[in-house]
Image (cartoon, helix red, strand yellow):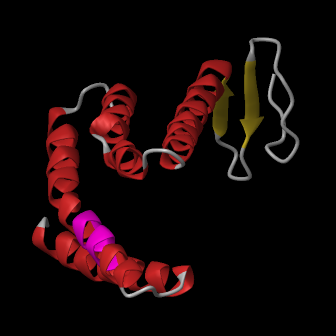
């Protein structure tokens, strides 16, 4: 049984089945929705742990916020969603490795701005500007 994509309803098979405006079938399974929900919950938990830790141990919270758990989780999800495609995984890890540099510049700019006692808005603008410039260079270099 097919449903209009503008009106998703639970199909008897446990999937949300629909027909797109182009006449093609699309299916969003319950397992796929659970996978997305698990990603969101884990991400929220990491953020909550880091912000709670920041109250007593700010440098530890900084370490938690940049620890490889985030990269490892994304690595696992990309691997599972792409059935271990070795070329894709190689390109992903290369991008992640070189992507560390823009992140370092982001936090370096933030640290300098905070040292100069700039307001948070200026800190974020400067930090994201540094990150964006480095990210553009990153994308040019890893091609």
| Front-most of residues 86 and 49 | 49
Horizontal and vertical percent position of residue 87: 15, 40
The quarter of the picture where the N terminus appears is top right
The quarter of the picture where the C terminus appears is bottom left
Left/right placement of residue 100 relative to residue 118 reads left
Left/right placement of residue 70 relative to residue 102 reads right
| Front-most of residues 122 and 86 | 122
Look at 37% across and 40% down and name the residue there.
70
Q: Is residue 2 above or below residue 87?
A: above
Q: Tell me the magenta residue range.
A: 103-109
Q: Residue furthest front?
A: 56
Residue 105 forms part of the magenta stretch: yes
| Front-most of residues 56 and 50 | 56
Horizontal and vertical percent position of residue 131: 32, 75
Location of residue 106 (image quadrant): bottom left
Look at 84% across and 36% down and name the residue there.
8
Horizontal and vertical percent position of residue 93: 18, 45
Q: Is residue 28 above or below residue 129?
A: above
| Front-most of residues 51 and 47 | 51
Q: Is residue 49 above or below residue 105?
A: above
């Amino acid at each position: 049984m097919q449903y209009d994509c503008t009106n998703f309803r639970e199909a008897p098979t446990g999937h949300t089945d629909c027909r797109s405006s182009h006449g093609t079938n699309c299916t969003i399974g319950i397992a796929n929705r659970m996978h997305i929900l698990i990603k969101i919950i884990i991400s929220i938990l990491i953020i909550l742990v880091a912000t709670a830790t920041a109250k007593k141990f700010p440098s530890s919270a900084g370490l938690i916020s940049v620890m490889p758990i985030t990269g490892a989780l994304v690595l696992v999800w990309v691997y599972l969603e792409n059935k271990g495609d070795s070329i894709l995984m190689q390109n992903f890890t290369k991008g992640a490795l070189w992507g560390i540099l823009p992140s370092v510049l982001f936090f370096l700019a933030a640290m300098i701005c905070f040292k100069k006692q700039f307001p948070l808005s200026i800190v974020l603008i400067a930090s994201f500007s540094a990150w964006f410039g480095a990210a553009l260079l990153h994308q040019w270099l890893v091609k």
